[in-house]
Image (cartoon, rainbow, N blue to C red):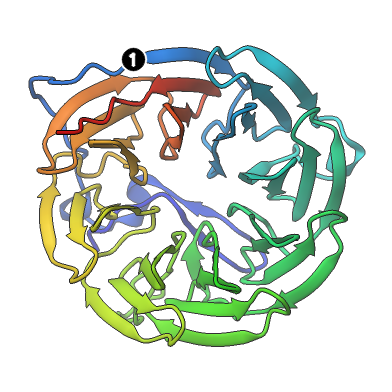
Amino acid sequence: MKKWFKRIAVISSATFLLTGCSLFSSEDDVVIMADLPDFEATYKPQTAWQQSIGNGVDKYYSQLQPVADEQGVYVASRDGRVKAFAPTSGKLLWETDFRDDPSNQLNRSARFSGGITLATDTLFIGTENAQVLAFDKNSGKLKWLVKVSGEVVAQPVYENGKVVVHTTRGDLIALDSATGEEIWTLTNKQPKLTLRSSATPSISQGGVVYGRADGFVAVALLEDGRPLWQLPVARPYGATELDRMVDADMKPVINNGVIYTLAYNGNLVAIDLLKGQQLWARKYSGYSDIALSGNTLYLSDYRGYIFAVDRNSGEELWVNDQLSYRNVTGVTVANEYIVVGDGEGYLHWINRDNGLFVAQQHLDSDGLYMQPFTSDGYLYLQTRSGKIIAIEKPSLNVE
């Protein structure tokens, strides 16, 4: 088995992380991280400001990333700190320390993991302690905290007064955004072995679209959780449970009534949202979020290869394989470029049209784990060690 990853977990009475060379049975199976690509830079990224959120996420699995609006940039650390900064200057606006809250007494820490999600005046965060928390975005004051049926390591999503979370047990849960009261729960059976995460849902046209650990993409009605349809995007095969992993583990992208999603050991697929019919499928395998801009999908696969794919046909437009096994993040579009981070802390800038590198920045020797969040004129990036970095978005060339 030559597929290398760090995000596998057994979902049973005990959860453990498989890492490093213990996955492999021989020297032939060990993959080699690519050297840092060497090229002549044609673009120079500009860092606007940098701040800290304490210890960040350290070496733990996390999907914490900044969110922003015109009033602030909102960030959280795994141990329970939440801060807001001014978007253009990085000035601290407020901070909340949840580390010593009584609800953490039976756990190692607050273990924030899923989020942040911003909805009007509220920030929502999920935790590995099976909690969902709501904070006032203007003050950081805790509005409510509720227990749910499993770890919330995926980002919550908000629509129409409801907060929807997808737990590592496979449950899809809708909460009242004002009170945290549970509105409905949809339970899904989990395979014995899954990636150490769960897919962040997307909401469109009254439906909650989400990927499952059994390789299906499914839609449930936002109003009451009623299942509408499900479609396999990956089929388990192989002799072992490890070989048979087929998680559809990224947030579905929805545009003009079409769902685009990717599965581990599966396919990149386009699906009609209302009918649940597959429009096309192409063989790719990955677990990081994909990006859509214009008619092009941008994705990174499990090896760290970066692809551009035509969204209408699935035709591959270009591939960049120079970041292989560098633990590459998902993709963010930054006007004429796309950016991805890697496990050694480099942010790579790539020309959208041809897949060639134009710049790279070394931001944190502890590594990058999530793609940047883009808002107005900036990219906001959170590093493993807890740095919050605002990078100016390149000017959009209009010819």
The foreground one among 153 and 271 is 271
Residue located 31% across and 73% down the image:
270
Quarter of the image with the C terminus in it: top left
User: Is 281 situated left or right of 141 in this image?
Assistant: left
User: Is 353 situated left or right of 53 in this image?
Assistant: left
> What residue occupies the far right of the structure in this picture?
102
Q: Is residue 135 visible?
A: yes
Residue located 29% across and 18% down the image:
45
- Quarter-wise, where is residue 220 in the image? bottom right
Residue located 27% across and 58% down the image:
3
Where residue 105 appears, x then y in whole percent?
87, 40
Residue at image mark 1: 46
- Helix, strand, or loop for circle 1? loop
Where residue 91 appears, x then y in whole percent?
63, 12
Where residue 347 appears, x then y in whole percent?
31, 28
Quarter of the image with the N terminus in it: bottom left
Residue located 29% across and 36% down the image:
335
Q: Is residue 105 visible?
A: no
Please determine whether, in this image, residue 143 is positioned above or below residue 203.
above
- Quarter-wise, where is residue 41 in the image? top left
Classed neighbour count for the residue bearing mark 1: other residues with Cα under 10 Å, few (<14), some (14–19), many (≥20): few
Name the amino acid type tagged 1.
Answer: Gln
Please determine whether, in this image, residue 167 is positioned above or below residue 379.
below
The foreground one among 383 and 75 is 75
Where residue 172 appears, x then y in whole percent?
66, 70
The foreground one among 394 and 113 is 394
User: Is 146 situated left or right of 286 in this image?
Assistant: right
Please determine whether, in this image, residue 34 is positioned above or below residue 230.
above
> What residue occupies the far front of the structure in this picture?
399
